Image (spheres, grey):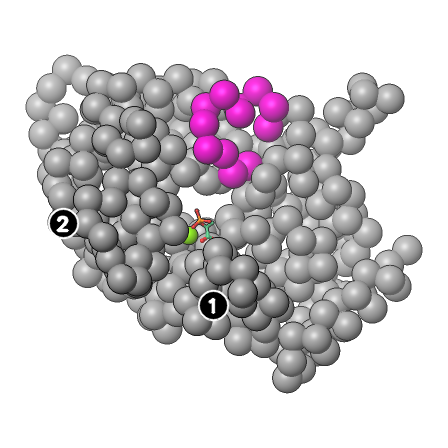
């Protein structure tokens, strides 16, 4: 039975009409790599690098990072390794040298990286040096403006030029932006023209769009990723990325929800990064619907006014699958 399960998990994900989908894994530590393979992942779509913070407070040294990333990249090669730069601060309560009244709207992610060059420089140099296998991609957390993307791109170029003068063999990785702040959705046309790929973070996008703290139990019933505002944003992000020929994937928890999958595929999404244990059931579900069917579903969902009506429509779609 195990052999059959593993064969099924590793079979490619195709819809009933033959459209190929790709499932990658979200991971926190390199030790997870062997198990993502058996779950059928085609690589790592999100490595949350902030887990490398030593004792949860100190940034790891450049040499340690280089070794760590190289080991991961080589183990995955030729499959991709998307390293998200340290997303510290906010709900990720590591490295908080200051106390803030509202950390989710405070100093976190890309803002810290831009303000503390020692941290950014060490991480970018480590990634460049580790990319001998050429399968690493860089993902920027908490992007809200083009200026932030340009600032990181300039710094990356500076390190590329410097390392070019050395003996070290490396390849410049592709640069992508997390889309997880509503402002980024408003400028999605410009962002998708400025980066090589985007990855949608539905956890933070839901939090910031609905003004609902993702970790506050009192308001958890309001944290609803099927809110019409979220679905309309997702449709806009995915269709804009596709028309600008920018690769788009989704790495928030929504990617694991079977109710969401047909909607996302109907919008044009083909790449998902999820907890690897969820991949086999998502692939199995994808084999049961056609893209034409999902386009109808998307049209209906985009016109519905409430999350509960949207969920009813998505459940009806599931129930009617053969
Ligand atoms: C997200 O915000 O959806 C995401 C994938 O990143 P994290 O959960 O690490 O904030
Ligand atoms: Mg996030």
The answer to whether the beta carbon of the residue marked 1 is less than 8 Å from any atom of ligand 1 is no
Q: Outermost residue, right direction?
A: 322
Query: Is 230 on the left or on the right of 318, as rendered?
Result: left
For mark 2, give the secondary structure: helix
> Which contiguous range is marked in magenta?
25-36
Give whichever of 237, 216 is nearer the camera. 216
Residue 57 inside the magenta-drawn segment: no
Q: Which residue is mark 2?
A: 115
Q: Residue at x 45, y 27 (%)?
A: 29
Residue 197 is at least partly visible in this image: yes
Q: Position of residue 90 (x, y in %)?
A: 33, 53
Residue drawn at 27 percent across, 34 percent down = 57
| Visible residue check, residue 170 | no
Is residue 20 placed above or below 180 in the rendered structure? Answer: above
| The C terminus lies in quadrant | bottom right
Q: Position of residue 162 (x, y in %)?
A: 9, 29
Asked whether 172 or 301 is in front, the reply is: 301
Q: Is residue 52 left or right of residue 9?
A: left
- In-front residue for pair 284/210: 210
Q: CA distance from mark 1 to mark 2?
A: 27 Å
Contact (Cβ within 8 Å) of mark 1 with mark 2: no
Q: Residues within 10 Å of mark 2 (few under 14, many from 20)?
A: few
Does 32 lie within the magenta span? yes
In the picture, the quarter occupied by the N terminus is: top right
Closer to the camera: disc 1 or disc 2? 1
Residue assigned mark 1: 212
Quarter location, residue 221 = bottom right
Q: Position of residue 289 (x, y in %)?
A: 79, 56
At horizontal 34% and vertical 59% (from top left) the residue drawn is 104
Label 1 element class = loop
């Amino acid at each position: 039975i195990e052999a059959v399960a593993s064969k099924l998990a590793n079979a490619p994900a195709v819809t009933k009409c033959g459209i190929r989908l790709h499932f990658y894994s979200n991971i926190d530590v390199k030790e997870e790599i062997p198990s993502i393979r058996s779950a059928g992942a085609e690589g790592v779509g999100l490595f949350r690098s902030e887990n490398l913070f030593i004792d949860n407070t100190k940034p790891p040294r450049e040499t340690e990072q280089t070794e760590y990333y190289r080991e991961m990249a080589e183990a995955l090669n030729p499959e991709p390794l998307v390293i998200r730069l340290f997303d510290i601060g906010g709900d990720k309560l590591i490295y908080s040298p200051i106390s803030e009244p509202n950390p989710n709207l405070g100093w976190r992610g890309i803002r810290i990286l831009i303000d503390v060059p020692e941290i950014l420089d060490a991480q970018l140099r480590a990634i460049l040096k580790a990319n001998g296998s050429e399968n690493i991609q860089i993902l920027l957390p908490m992007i809200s403006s083009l200026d932030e993307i340009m600032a990181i791109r300039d710094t990356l170029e500076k390190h590329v030029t410097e390392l070019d003068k050395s003996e070290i063999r490396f390849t410049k990785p592709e640069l992508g932006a997390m889309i997880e702040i509503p402002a980024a959705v408003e400028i999605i046309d410009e962002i998708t023209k400025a980066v090589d790929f985007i990855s949608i973070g539905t956890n933070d996008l839901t939090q910031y769009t609905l003004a609902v703290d993702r970790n506050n139990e009192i308001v958890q019933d309001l944290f609803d990723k099927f809110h019409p505002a979220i679905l309309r944003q997702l449709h806009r992000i995915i269709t804009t990325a596709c028309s600008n020929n920018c690769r788009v994937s989704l790495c928030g928890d929504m990617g694991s929800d079977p109710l969401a999958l047909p909607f996302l595929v109907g919008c044009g999404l083909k790449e998902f990064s999820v907890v690897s244990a969820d991949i086999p059931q998502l692939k199995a579900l994808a084999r049961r619907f056609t893209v034409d069917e999902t386009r109808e579903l998307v049209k209906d969902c985009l016109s519905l006014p409430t999350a509960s009506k949207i969920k009813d429509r998505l459940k009806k779609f599931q129930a009617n699958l053969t």
